[in-house]
Image (cartoon, rainbow, N blue to C red):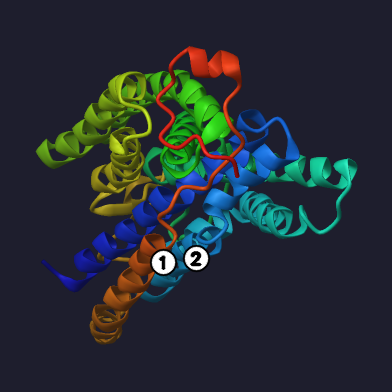
Amino acid sequence: MTLPTVWFVVVAFFWTGFFVLEGFDFGVGALHTFVGRTNVERRVAINTIGPVWDGNVVWLVVAGAAMFGAFPGWYATWFSSLNLALWLVLAALIVRGVSIEFRGKFDTDRWRSSWSATLTLGSLLAPLLFGVGLGDLLAGLPIDDAGTFTGSFLDLLTPYGLWVGLTLLALCLSHGASFLSVRCTGVVYDRAVRFGRPLALVSAVLVVGFAIWTFVTADSGIGGMVALAVPVVAAIFGVVLTGSKPGTGRAFTASTVAVGGTVAAVFANLYPAVLVSTSDPAYTLTVQNSASSNYALKVMTIAAAVLVPLVLAYQGWTYYVFRARVRGPRRSPATAQAGRADPDNAEG
């Protein structure tokens, strides 16, 4: 395996890790006003991601930095093509972070409800826009022989890209619901389980459509077909598990594989291209023609071999430290009589 190919896999790994980790953050942020009807309940939902959300966002920075260092041509063309869309993404990410930090600064309903609304909006927009951008890599964009984007903003809204965006949005919502089911208790847990079932079903339908569309678009080989089968199987298992064993962690594992598998499948079916040109196939950017020099890739490989394991170990330790459930208000008597499997019914 050549160094450019190795770094293509590394870039795909970082993007996959970003969606796996930040995906449930997006889901919790979008769902917190639905699983929580009072300020205390919404605070419980937000507190499940409080210690980790900012660390999860770093995976996006690392993914972009890896692209910039290993494939400057790919980075320059793709990011310049998505210029306006990236401004919207940055606005969504900034609003999310500010909302989480500022929501509890003043004890007024109007203040908290305003920041809850912006948190929900930012959490919905970010995965949708990211998904459209990733889908455009495979669907293709109008690029000339110099790697310059020659289209307009509307050219970014490819049908396939929009489908990928909707698929990742639905997966993040389902991922967030399953995360809440293993990280909180009480009424927030109950509502997360209740929302998780239909969200898992919608996600599964969209993932199946994504797999079929990707197979047709990319003319997938054996490797691409296997990559597409992984999120499909995981999404179907997610539907079953959210209905039979909520709160056990199995549904969360299924949603994790479904989210990560979907992103990984895009890259697996994109290779050896990195950005398809719809203007002329000869202008398509590939792993080989957009990579940095061999020397630069060697230096990056040494640095990554040392630093990435340290980052993974640190982040794993963080999740271990904050593994306990966030206790929420007790269930209502009606919910308790329904026999929901709340793992911990203690008051927060």
In the figure, is residue 259 to the left or right of 121?
left
Q: Which mark is residue 55?
A: 2
Q: Quadrant of the C terminus?
A: top right
Q: CA distance from mark 1 to mark 2?
A: 9 Å
From the image, which quarter does the N terminus lie in?
Answer: bottom left
Give how far across and how far down residue 336 sits, in percent. 51, 19
Residue closest to the eye, 38 or 335: 335
- Which residue lies under the disc numbered 1? 318
In which quadrant of the rendered view does residue 201 lie?
top left
Residue 278: x and y in percent read 42, 41
Residue occupying the point 35% across, 44% down: 263
Q: Residue at x 48, y 34 (%)?
A: 177
Find out whether the residues at labels 1 and 2 contact each other: C-beta distance under 8 Å: yes
The answer, for residue 284, to whether it is visible in the render is no
Residue 115 pos. (x, y %): 78, 47
- Marked residue nearer the N-terminal end (1 or 2): 2
**How many labels were placed on the picture?**
2
Disc 1: CA contacts within 10 A as few (<14), some (14-19) or many (>=20): some
The amino acid type of the residue labelled 2 equals Gly
- Residue 55 can be seen, yes or no: yes
Q: Amino acid at mark 1?
A: Thr
Label 1 secondary element: helix
Instruction: Estimate how packed mark 2 is, as few (under 14), some (14 to 19) or many (20 or more) residues with alpha carbons within 10 Å.
Output: few
Against 152, residue 322 (above or below) is below
The residue that appears at 49% across and 21% down in the rendered structure is 194
The residue closer to the viewer here, 262 or 51, is 51
